[in-house]
Image: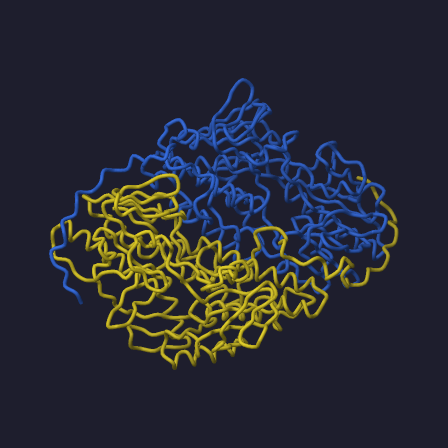
Chain colours: A yellow, B blue
Amino acid sequence: MVIVGAGFGGLQAAKALGKADSVRVTVVDRYNHHLFQPLLYQVATAVLNPADISAPIRSVLHARNTEVMLAEAKSVDTRRKVLVIEGGEIPYDSLVLGTGATHSYFKHPEWDRVAPGLKTLEDAVRIRERVLTAFEAAERESDPVRQREWMTFVIIGAGPTGVELAGALAYMTRHSLPKDFRRIDTREARVILLEGLPRVLSAYPEVLSEAAKRDLEKLHVEVRTGAMVTDVDAEGVTFGDEHISTRTVLWGAGVAASPLVRSLEVPLDRAGRVKVTPLLTAPGLSDVYVIGDVAAVEQHGKPVPGIAPAAMQMGRHVGKTIRDRLANRPLRAFRYHDKGSFAVIGRGYAVGVLFDKWRMKGLPAWMVWAGVHIAYLIGFRNRISVMLNWGYTFFTKGGRDLRLITGKVSPRMPALASSTQAPALPPAQPELPAPRSVPVH
Amino acid sequence: MVIVGAGFGGLQAAKALGKADSVRVTVVDRYNHHLFQPLLYQVATAVLNPADISAPIRSVLHARNTEVMLAEAKSVDTRRKVLVIEGGEIPYDSLVLGTGATHSYFKHPEWDRVAPGLKTLEDAVRIRERVLTAFEAAERESDPVRQREWMTFVIIGAGPTGVELAGALAYMTRHSLPKDFRRIDTREARVILLEGLPRVLSAYPEVLSEAAKRDLEKLHVEVRTGAMVTDVDAEGVTFGDEHISTRTVLWGAGVAASPLVRSLEVPLDRAGRVKVTPLLTAPGLSDVYVIGDVAAVEQHGKPVPGIAPAAMQMGRHVGKTIRDRLANRPLRAFRYHDKGSFAVIGRGYAVGVLFDKWRMKGLPAWMVWAGVHIAYLIGFRNRISVMLNWGYTFFTKGGRDLRLITGKVSPRMPALASSTQAPALPPAQPELPAPRSVPVH
């Protein structure tokens, strides 16, 4: 049993098989940690530490029959039944693929360099540093036009990631940053959320989209729906007839399945996902299971959403299927139970649907969201740390202490002012008088 | 008033001048954060988060007369009285240089690539990832000789940094890591501490050096004193007639003053530090103060040590001197008050000297050390977070959750085993029976 990817799906599959002593499980991942992706935007906006939302895979999977290997999977050779990794091969009898999704820039892979997306810890730290560096650059910049460009932030895509990023970023500019700068007023920063569809959070009921938009606007996010982006470069973003000059563009728009599944040579949907069978196997490959964001599953004519609970349910189901097959028990088709999904707009404010029934917004929605996220977070220390950081942010109006740029001054930083001139520094202090006496000890 | 470097010295100077309304203070640093360097080794050994021991300079220096600029200082032009930074110049009337120390590889700058030192957060994260990756590589490696090389760690230099790193690393291999691996026993890892001088912690009284050595050996650190290293490369370390094959060498041996002070064109000592006047100014430059690790200060014929309290005292003294000169008050020479210094050996165990008088070791020394470090740490959230992480580590025997390799599988990782063969994986599970029935939902 080889499981590729220790995300929400892979981890559940491994855990479900951890007690099946006749099975040996090898979990392969290119990272050493499981990542709690739903809170990634809080690392990007300096509310949480990277380690708060990650757990070493080895420390999560302790079952004696389970082995963890840090390796990048390259392809699957279904004829020889081997997983090809960098520098070697791993034979499998059953294979579970839960390799997740990556950003998709549709037909514009070149946007990748200017508009980073948010999928990994590296992405989150990069976005945090880009945003903080933009304010540093604005503070140093003397040309008002360029200064405004540094203080303009565009987020493309108003799904949950885009909405959460925009809300948290706007909150930061209004509450945690203003006191820190002398030459700029960070409250004048523009946070612009662009969405090609007619409304934000289009997977949610319309009434919640409306509520989310109103609340984003209260936080001074400029929400522009029906805005199809046609160009993104280092100078700004173009959509329709409009152009916004900005130095910081974040990408929350498209995702595509991890390319590993292409090597299965089975039918994929438009997002590159495998159209799996009811047992979650790849069509024609009864020993290859595909789960989470790389699987396209339909239920009641609706696609199962690409969210953590769906991936976890698929992982558990595959674990059960494999145990049932070993025990020669009848197998059941996968069935998705919609427990709900939520998106956070701002401090103590969220929208969401619980059990596919109850629409919630405001503080109650935020409380459900917070409780569920704390409960599902892996590791006792992480739970404590996240709660403390939230409490701190809540009471002090801003995650002051985590505003860390790890590296030294960025190469992206503009030269001092726009010329080699000295900046308009405060006038020199009065000439110091000469020392009167210096008793030498 | 321009202050270069927001370390312990620069920060104290800025704070001392924060209330002097006739002075305008500009603090220049290439990092956006003040770093609490004494705890850096705990980031390197996965006990603390990077953000736990850093604080954004802007949030620390809130005085209205104080401005922070993120920039890399290049040189000082004392004739024109300007600080040259990347892409510009900043005129000064008084200048305080507190740019600290960097690693020194003596006459072997090429060792830099193979034997990273520990001065910045980037260094700490790099060391953490190197160490964790070495165990991952050992787990993947099938050749026992190479496996032993991956599990051998050499630390060069048994000053406080080297001793603390060695102790924490040995503790990790014995307590936090063993349960995580299947093919290797991390308790068999060798941690070797090399010191050219006849004893460890040579700045401490001999009896404490002895105690430290004994305690390191209890933690299974191999301590080798009188070991002059003559070669370091990617394959290992040579000293005397001996060669140790290892993939991981850490550098705790030499430091040298930051090169910025060279542009002052004043006499420097062998470590590149400015031999300052009793007022802590550079000789012949009454408007240039030099503090902390870039200043060479003697007192009672003994050098003032390069530790945080000394730098803080110098920073405060310079702030006071400048205020006194403005007020036309008599000036006093700097005088160092030795409050003590401590080095941690292991969990709940340290050695040190308090007030230049009391020698301490064991748990009492550790408690003083911990109390002082918590007290001097900047930021309420950091204090809470560090205490929690220490408590967690203490009670669970190891910093399990922070063992984060942020990036994906490292390029340093060996190819799978030493050939392109499949590794000796556990035997395949019994062939699965075909599914019996698949009710489609």
> Where is residue A155 drawn, in percent x and y?
51, 68
Image quadrant in which the C terminus of chain A is located: top right
In the displayed structure, does residue B414 sit left or right of residue A338?
A: right
Quadrant in which residue A253 is drawn: bottom left
Which residue ends up furthest to the top in the rendered image? Answer: B241
Image: A59 above or below A40: above
> Where is residue B19 drawn, in percent x and y?
73, 61
Which one is in front, B404 or B339?
Answer: B404
> Where is residue B96 drawn, in percent x and y?
75, 49
Instruction: Give the tally of numbered discs.
Output: 0
> Where is residue B148 drawn, in percent x and y?
41, 29
Image: B282 above or below B434: above
Image: A87 above or below B434: above
